[in-house]
Image (spheres, rainbow, N blue to C red):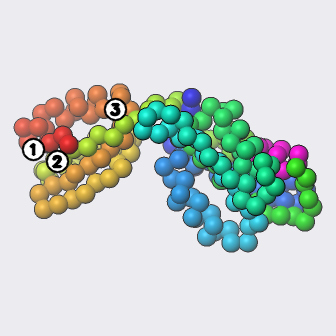
Amino acid sequence: MQTLTEVANATLEIKKSTFHAYLVPFADFEMWREKLKSDHPKARHIVWAYRALNAYGQIVENQTDDGEPKGTSGPPALNALRGAQLIDAAVLVVRYFGGIKLGPGGLVRAYAGATNAAIDVAALVPFAPKRDVRFYVPYALVQRVEYWVEKEGCGTKERVFDATGATWTLALTKAQEEAFVSFTCAFEQEGLVWL
């Protein structure tokens, strides 16, 4: 399985219709959906599909045709994600209608093609499941933890400051978690608390 860490996009033009495909990390899916609605108010359709891993290690999939004929847009985009063995990834395809109807087969090819074009230019990486690690650090340790998180490229899911320090939630792979525990082993004497 593979995933991506940054957005990739591609554009296809078929019979004067333009298909802009955006392949995004699943964590950013809702933000991108709102952004594309705002950025493309005149678009005829914004079709999407995603594959994600839930807390129980199960693959969750969803898609929408967004007004296109049933089964002609969302399912082909989802099938392209499956074919690339992508997980924790979403694709959003913005269509501007060019005045020529493509027919069901043409729509299937267009949405699958746009999704595959975005996959082709994406920087894909091997997928490693992550779990949330939650802890508290006093202000004296915040900079050191920030440095490690940035250096290791870890995702901060949440960070809440109070009067004496910060409570963090990080999404870490097993290897990252082991490295983080090793990095912070001396911090427990300085006030780190696992939550």
Residue occupying the point 83% across, 64% down = 97
Q: Main secondary structure of the magenta part?
A: helix
Residue at mark 1: 191
Residue 176, numbered label: 3
Magenta span has 37? Answer: no
Q: Is residue 110 magenta?
A: yes
Report the number of numbered marks: 3
Task: Look at label 2 and name its amino acid.
Answer: Val
Q: Is residue 133 above or below residue 48?
A: above
Question: Mark 3: which amino acid?
Answer: Gln
Residue 120 falls in image quadrant: top right
Q: Position of residue 183 (x, y in %)?
A: 22, 33
Other-residue count near label 2 (Cα within 10 Å), few / some / many at <14 / 14–19 / ≥20: many
Q: Between marks 1 and 2, how big is the CA–CA gap?
A: 6 Å
Can residue 12 be seen at all in this image of the molecule? no
Q: Which mark is residue 137?
A: 2
> Mark 1 and 2 residues: CB-CB less than 8 Å, in contact?
yes
Location of residue 182 by image quarter: top left
**Dot 3 lies on which element?**
helix
What residue sits 32% from the left and 44% below the top? 170
Separation (CA) of disc 1 from disc 3 = 21 Å
Dot 2 or dot 3: first in sequence order is: 2
Which amino acid, by three-letter code, is at mark 1? Gly
Vertical placement of 152 versus 48: above or below? Answer: above
Q: Position of residue 20 (x, y in %)?
A: 72, 56
Q: Quadrant of residue 98?
A: bottom right
Q: Residue drawn at (48%, 49%), measured in percent from left and top?
A: 27
Residue at 31 percent of width and 32 percent of height:
177
Q: Which residues are magenta?
A: 105-115
Please rate how many residues cluster around mark 1, counting C-alpha atoms within 10 Å: few if below 14, some from 14 to 19, many from 20.
some
Q: Return the disc, 1 or 3, that comes first in the chain's sequence.
A: 3
Q: Position of residue 132 (x, y in %)?
A: 33, 40
